[in-house]
């Protein structure tokens, strides 16, 4: 819970005030925290691509949005990222549980894990890879960078960082 | 009535509200009829008009109208479940249902066969779902906007067919910034 709380605290400190998620068990604690938080908007959404659209609208309405999802969600969202968020230069935080990284018990998650960073790199999306608690401290600066460069950015949270955060 | 005739009929209503307009011919026709800074034209991301409008309506208090098409809603059908559960009362989804993929050469969509978007929307949890003719749409849309307690899904059944039209000459950042300025999100323009 400590790590999840720290991640959300850092995002809120950066002004992130609108959250949607397609759940992951590694994000479950963060979702619990957000559901109880009256200062921000939070909702689940059925699909990541749709969530990208909702975040785009929230940005137009002067929110600083964040979509939480597994790395598989990037695969579901490529056109929405390129032809909406990047085309109109909209800062949106992707908070990604990086399934398939070492520690992952589900072998099938390894496939998307192998290509996730390549996809993000191809899309020219700045990445913050969080594998330890001290990486989480970089979130405020990194989130602000999204606003400055008017771009979606990705925060990747390793399996092993999140798995013991019960 | 086709889409161009319908959008022409809705001009006065659209002018007073925040409008998210679907990619392709709907946006091009709306631009040609009467371009306004409070119109956000989609230049990509087919399927997401309803979602962009929903995010916008959740983020500020002005009335939002998402103009969508049957083909686009079929592409992002989960949006109806999200709208059914989360849409605030300042949100209206107007689905222009002509039973065809208008921007790509008028191929038939499934709403021209067995699929009823009205039934899907009701099943997805949307409370106020109106299916009407093109001629009735202005009246239904006005009523939806005047109702301050409910969000609406309006399915306007019209004929397929397009007018010959040019792409929108505005660049995406211009569309973005003048829209955000209209809302009051930016003050640097």
Image (cartoon, rainbow, N blue to C red):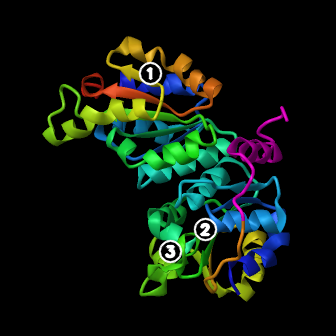
State the separation of the CA atoms marked 2 and 1: 40 Å
Q: Residue at x 58, y 81 (%)?
A: B98
Residue B34 lies within the magenta run: no
Q: Which residue is mark 3?
A: B121
Q: Chain of mark 2?
A: B
- Mark 3 or 1: the one toward you: 3
Helix, strand or loop status at disc 3 = helix
Where's the N terminus of chain B, which quadrant? bottom right
- Mark 2 or 1: the one toward you: 2
Q: Is residue A5 left or right of residue B150?
A: left
Q: Which residue is mark 2?
A: B68
Q: Position of residue A97 (x, y in %)?
A: 34, 34
Q: Which mark is residue A6?
A: 1
Q: Residue at x 75, y 66 (%)?
A: B30
Most extreme residue toward the top is A134
Q: Quadrant of residue B188?
A: top right
Q: Position of residue A13 (x, y in %)?
A: 58, 22
Q: Residue at x 50, y 66 (%)?
A: B80
Please give the range of residues in magenta: B166-189
> Is there any visible trace of residue A16 in the rendered image?
yes
């Amino acid at each position: 819970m400590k790590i999840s709380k720290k991640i959300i605290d850092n995002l809120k400190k950066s002004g992130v005030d609108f959250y949607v998620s397609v759940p992951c068990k590694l994000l479950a604690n963060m979702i619990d925290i957000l559901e109880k938080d009256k200062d921000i908007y939070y909702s689940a959404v059925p699909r990541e691509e749709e969530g990208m659209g909702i975040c785009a609208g929230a940005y137009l309405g002067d929110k600083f949005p964040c979509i939480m999802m597994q790395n598989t969600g990037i695969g579901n969202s490529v056109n929405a990222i390129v032809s909406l968020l990047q085309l109109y230069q909209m800062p949106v935080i992707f908070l990604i549980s990086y399934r398939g990284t070492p520690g992952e018990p589900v072998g099938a998650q390894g496939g998307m894990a192998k290509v996730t960073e390549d996809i993000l790199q191809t899309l020219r999306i700045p990445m913050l890879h969080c594998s330890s608690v001290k990486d989480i401290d970089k979130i405020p600066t990194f989130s602000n960078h999204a606003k400055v460069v008017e771009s979606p950015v990705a925060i990747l949270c390793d399996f092993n960082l999140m798995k013991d955060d019960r | 009535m086709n889409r161009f005739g319908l959008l022409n009929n809705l001009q006065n209503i659209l002018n007073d509200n925040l409008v998210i307009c679907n990619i392709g011919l709907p946006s091009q026709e709306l631009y040609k009829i009467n371009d306004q800074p409070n119109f956000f034209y989609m230049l990509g991301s087919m399927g997401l008009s309803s979602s962009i409008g929903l995010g916008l309506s959740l983020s500020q208090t002005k009335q939002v109208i998402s103009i969508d098409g049957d083909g686009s809603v079929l592409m992002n059908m989960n949006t109806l479940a999200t709208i059914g559960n989360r849409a605030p009362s300042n949100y209206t989804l107007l689905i222009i249902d002509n039973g065809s993929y208008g921007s790509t050469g008028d191929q038939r969509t499934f709403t021209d066969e067995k699929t009823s978007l009205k039934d899907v929307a009701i099943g997805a949890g949307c409370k106020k779902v109106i299916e009407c003719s093109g001629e009735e749409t202005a009246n239904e849309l006005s009523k939806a906007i005047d109702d301050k307690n409910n969000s609406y899904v309006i399915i306007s059944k019209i004929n397929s067919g397009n007018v010959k039209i040019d792409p929108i000459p505005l660049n995406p950042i211009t569309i973005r910034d003048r829209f955000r300025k209209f809302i009051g999100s930016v003050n640097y323009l």
